[in-house]
Image: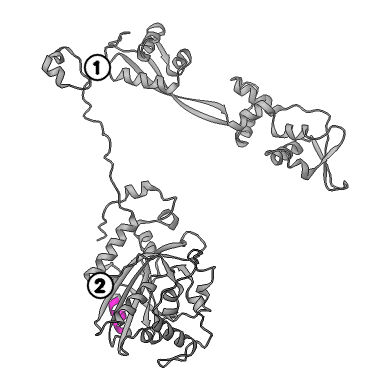
Amino acid sequence: MADLGELVLQHVAKDGEITTSELAQRLQKDHQQIVGAVKSLQSLGNIIESEQRTSKHWELTEEGKEVTKDGSHEARVYNAIPADGGIQQAQLMKSGPYAKIGFSKAMSAGWLEVNKKAPGGPTVQRKVASIVDRVQNQLKQLQQGNLSDITDKEKAELKKRKLIQEVTVNIFLVWKGSGFTTSVQKLDTDLTPEMISSGSWKGKPFKAYNFDAMGVPPTAGHLHPLLKVRAEFRQIFLEMGFTEMPTNNYIESSFWNFDALFQPQQHPARDAHDTFFIKDPEFAHEFPMDYLERVKKVHSEGGYGSQGYKYDWKLSEAKKNILRTHTTAVSARMLYKLAQQEKFTPVKYFSIDRVFRNETLDATHLAEFHQIEGVVADYNLSLGHLIGILHAFFKKLGIEKLRFKPAYNPYTEPSMAVFSYHEGLKKWVEIGNSGVFRPEMLLPMGLPEDVVVIAWGLSLERPTMIKYGIDNIRDLIGPKVNLQMVYDNPICRLDK
């Protein structure tokens, strides 16, 4: 069998010029195969010339082909109704997958009527004795390429019903070139060691190098915008002398996530609407029991100068396993570990990791996101120290306009929300939360009375969205992330 390129040349020699669509019909080949053969012939020199042209035609969709075979939806609904009676509307709607649209179209055409007062519910009856399925006839005409009897309005209606679709095809008009021939000598693309040793390369034609070709882009990994901003935050903490906390335990007990933070067991955050509870394993079992008893006492009876919450504290509630709602649970573990040292030493901790909340998903909220947390424990710290550290921290991020507003947290007092002036939005926006950990949280751990712990936290996603101009958090993380966005963003940014 002759090569496809040679077959193309034979038809060009016969007709002088011909389109690739005509060639595909004559040779009974896929159009793209013909286009590929033409492109290959063009790469050999000036054997042929071509010009791209665009053609449009109508094609039936899969639903349209079904209508051509079985009849339109309205005709099928009409035929489903007994000629000598009626059928209950509810039953008619179950007659097929397209019964609803078919009923609507048949009513619009005046083929059916509904008796709403019939016993047993509304009944549908035939209004005309016979029908002409014009939609099916039109689709058959389109399938045969006969468009003369179908108006543009009717085509638009068929397209609206997704029975037909307009297809644009790029075809090529092909004609003889100045070096036309029907026999093609294939050019070699590789110079092999055998050709060199035998000298056969001297008589072989080689394909010319295309030095303008872009080449195949090398495959490589790409850094996600979240990872880039995370690395930036991490570097700032390290420059300020902080130590990173281990945050690899996504599953946490309610004790460390809530109770150790002096958060009462009746707090709304413990509701299933706000927290993801684990079914297997449902409960945690290993706790430092002496510390647990002190936490129980400060909750139910008070202590350390506090009157507590005065409720019946239950171990069963504290044992419940959850997906951690904040990385402050890790801070609680680290502070307890610090309190067990023979001699207290000041520390500065930070963490950046994922937390989970039973949130309603929208453009600014996800059920899982990242929390950035900084913790400083030292003697005789004050709110002034916290404000000073926050100014130093955010200045390294390029944020210098800060305001602080009183806030409430169960485990910090005083507490402050942190606001920054957003130049783009021209208003103050909340960027984080902060506070001084309560004595009711720290003293049961065994920390000295004059040790104060200050802390602050913010999200990772919102600064990243601002930095990269992303207005929907679901475009940043999750199964529908546009990978092209990850590829296109630079590996680093120079904001100043």
Residue 413 seen in this snapshot: no
Vertical relation: 70 (above or below) 268: above
Tag 1 and tag 2, C-beta contact below 8 Å: no
Badge 1: how crowded within 10 Å, few (<14), some, or many (20+)? Answer: few
Vertical relation: 239 (above or below) 196: below
Give the CA separation, mark 1 to mark 2: 65 Å
Which residue is drawn at the image coordinates 39% and 83% (left, top)? 291
Let me know if residue 388 is in the magenta part. Answer: yes
Q: Which residue is mark 1?
A: 187
Quadrant where the C terminus is found in the figure: bottom left
Q: Residue flagged by tag 2: what amino acid is it?
A: Phe
Residue 379 seen in this snapshot: yes
Horizontal and vertical percent position of residue 9: 36, 11
Q: Which residue is mark 2?
A: 242
Q: Residue flagged by tag 1: what amino acid is it?
A: Leu
Which of the two residues, 381 or 337, is positioned nearer the viewer here? 337
201 left or right, relative to 448? left
Which of the two residues, 428 or 451, is positioned nearer the viewer here? 451
First to last magenta residue range:
384-389
Which residue is drawn at the image coordinates 42% and 69% (left, top)? 252
